[in-house]
């Protein structure tokens, strides 16, 4: 199946931006068969296995972070932030009912905030990062239960964000699109990447979007990591 990727807003300056992130102008195509090169497939498969193990480690460490902040009665914003970050990993490995209970718990923590605390949180970033993590967790849950329409809707809804300093600088979560792209679902990944242009700004964001959309258009395996800007050149795609 051929996928046509619309990359509106990409200009020569964006292209140069992507290229600037690569080690030097002398980089050449290391993979002689491009995206079909067996050594590239092996590289991506190893990276995906690495991320899978990393997610399992983060599942454990983020749970400990939440438990410590909750038990120590720390800043309530910190408790909510720790639990929401844990949700990204809980949604991949915990039983469905456990994940739903943790989502409910986030909202309970929010309801326990004083009025002044709620106002302060809304002024800062409207809890956009936490809402994003909840949305991605819901996408994982729907996907695990075979409801693809609900999963992909939740994915796009998760980046209906505003004033998120964290996401504006570092970008959105990629754990879910890494999984569904590997499973062959390209369209929702393209929609997700394109929609990030509304809040994820700067040269790094432009370079990563350019790399990912170019690689998707060419049918490449992708690890969805900053190294993809380097692999773009090594594959001979720029």
Image: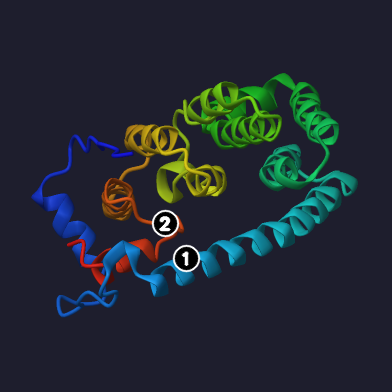
Q: In this view, does 37 lie to the left or right of 174?
A: left
Position of the C terminus by quadrant:
bottom left
How crowded is the residue under tag 2: few (<14 C-alpha within 10 Å), some, or many (20+)? many
Query: Does 58 sit above or below residue 109?
Result: below
Residue 68 x %, y %: 85, 53
Residue 12 x %, y %: 9, 50
Measure the alpha-carbon separation of dots 1 and 2: 7 Å
Residue drawn at (80%, 33%) of the image: 96
Q: In this view, does 118 lie to the left or right of 65?
A: left
Query: Does 217 sit above or below residue 16?
Result: above
Residue 58, picture quadrant: bottom right
Residue 201 x %, y %: 32, 43
Residue 40 x %, y %: 39, 70
Position of the N terminus by quadrant:
top left
Q: Is residue 36 left or right of residue 116?
A: left
Instruction: Indicate which disc, 1 or 2, sits on the residue closer to the N terminus.
Output: 1
Residue named by callout 2? 222
Query: Does 115 sit above or below residue 124?
Result: above
Residue named by callout 1? 44
Q: Are marks 1 and 2 in contact (CB under 8 Å)?
A: yes
Given residues 24 and 109, the one toward you in this image is 24
The residue sitting at the left extreme is 12
Residue drawn at (50%, 49%) of the image: 182
Residue drawn at (32%, 67%) of the image: 231
| Mark 1 residue element | helix
């Amino acid at each position: 199946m051929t996928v046509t990727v619309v990359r509106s807003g990409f200009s020569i300056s964006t292209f140069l931006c992507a290229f600037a992130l690569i080690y030097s102008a002398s980089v050449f195509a290391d993979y002689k068969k491009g995206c079909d090169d067996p050594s590239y497939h092996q590289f991506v498969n190893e990276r995906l296995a690495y991320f899978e193990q990393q997610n399992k480690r983060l599942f454990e460490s983020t749970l400990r972070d939440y438990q410590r902040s909750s038990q120590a009665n720390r800043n309530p914003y910190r408790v909510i932030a720790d639990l929401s970050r844990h949700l990204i990993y809980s949604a991949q490995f915990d039983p469905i009912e456990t994940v739903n209970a943790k989502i409910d718990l986030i909202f309970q923590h929010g309801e326990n905030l004083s009025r002044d605390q709620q106002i302060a949180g809304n002024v800062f970033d409207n809890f956009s990062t936490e809402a994003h993590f909840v949305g991605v967790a819901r996408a994982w849950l729907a996907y695990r239960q075979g409801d693809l329409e609900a999963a992909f809707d939740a994915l796009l809804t998760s980046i209906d964000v505003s004033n998120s300093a964290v996401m504006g600088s570092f970008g959105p979560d990629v754990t879910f699109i890494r999984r569904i792209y590997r499973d062959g679902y390209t369209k929702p990944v393209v929609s997700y990447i394109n929609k990030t242009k509304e809040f994820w700004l700067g040269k790094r964001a432009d370079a990563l979007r350019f790399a990912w959309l170019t690689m998707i258009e060419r049918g490449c395996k992708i690890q969805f990591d900053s190294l993809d800007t380097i692999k773009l050149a090594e594959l001979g795609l720029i």
